[in-house]
Amino acid sequence: MIDLSVDLGKFKIANPVMTASGTFGYGFEYKDYYDLKELGAVVVKGIATKPSHGNPTPRVAEVSSGMLNAIGLQGPGVDKFLNGAEYMPFLRTSAATVVVNIWGKSIEEYCDVAARLDAESEGIAALEINISCPNIKEGGVAFGTDLKLAHKVVSEIRKVTSLPLITKLSPNVTCIADFARAVVDAGSDMVSLINTLTGMAINVETRRPYIANMTGGLSGPAIKPVAVRMVYEVAQAVDVPIIGMGGIMTGDDAVEFLLAGASAIAVGTAIFVDPYAPIKVIKGIEDYLKRQGCKSVKEIVGAMVK
């Protein structure tokens, strides 16, 4: 028997595999594939105070070893999320551990959505603060690439909710460890990283960008070495649980992040290739632990040999 459970301080999960926000919808879309409670946690697509239509199409392009996306945080808004049958009401019946990703165009909007979710928090394990989306003109990465703003938005959200806070960090910075310190100092209970790297792809025949936004977020296997490095750097800088992500396709990919210092991981782009990817990653981690003679996943967290 292998113990896959993970203690994230403010809450526990059955195994270290989450879904990355924006890649798994709101869970409802995958209910016919497997029981959602098999996952460590379902991290839903970003929720804001009001509905958002996102960016114009085309919004996704396949590139070498990954994909570019500029969805632009399309979502139903907090009211529909809390009341629409296929959103939070469904998740409450699924018995899944639910993390709600939140975003805003101003600090006030972040606080408004956090306060609303706090007031109706049944079934919500934590909030993930998205300060790292590169695909919207206001908010998002504007907060995640300015140390003072990153600290400010987290500290203000901390005042309006007692829910555990996870801050999702941007890789599009000079020193990600500085941002981890800033948000933890502001009251974040955990950090998740990395969000997408800003990229661009051009159709040489039409001479136009493949996506209407021109630039987009690069995800998939191409970014995994960058993500592993940044997780390692953050693990040396802060003493809070880390959720690592970026290009995880297999159990061994996930183990790299755990060895680098992540307590849990999130599977994202792989789900577009294979809806069963998170389940396969759980099995892959378990197989690795058996090969290594480990009894618990905790034995490998931060266990890279230097």
Image (cartoon, rainbow, N blue to C red):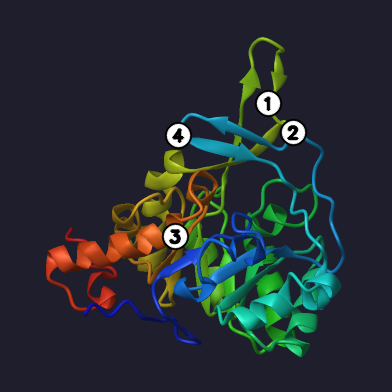
- Residue 258 vs residue 90: left or right? left
In the image shown, does 164 or 175 lie closer to the viewer? 164
Q: Is residue 78 above or below residue 163?
A: above
Question: Which mark, residue 191?
Answer: none
The reply to whether discs 2 and 3 touch (Cβ–Cβ < 8 Å) is: no
The amino acid type of the residue labelled 1 equals Tyr
Classify mark 1: residues with Cα within 10 Å, few (<14), some (14-19) or many (20+). many
- Looking at the rendered image, the quarter that the C terminus falls into is bottom left
Image-quadrant location for residue 155? bottom right
Q: Residues under labels 4 and 3: Cα distance?
A: 19 Å
| Mark 1 vs mark 2, CA separation in Å | 7 Å
The earlier-in-sequence mark between 2 and 3 is: 2
Q: Position of residue 305 (x, y in %)?
A: 17, 61
- Tell me the distance, in whole angstroms, between the alpha carbons under discs 2 and 3: 27 Å
Residue labelled with disc 4: 65
Q: Which mark is residue 58?
A: 2
**Of marks 2 and 3, the one in the foreground:** 3
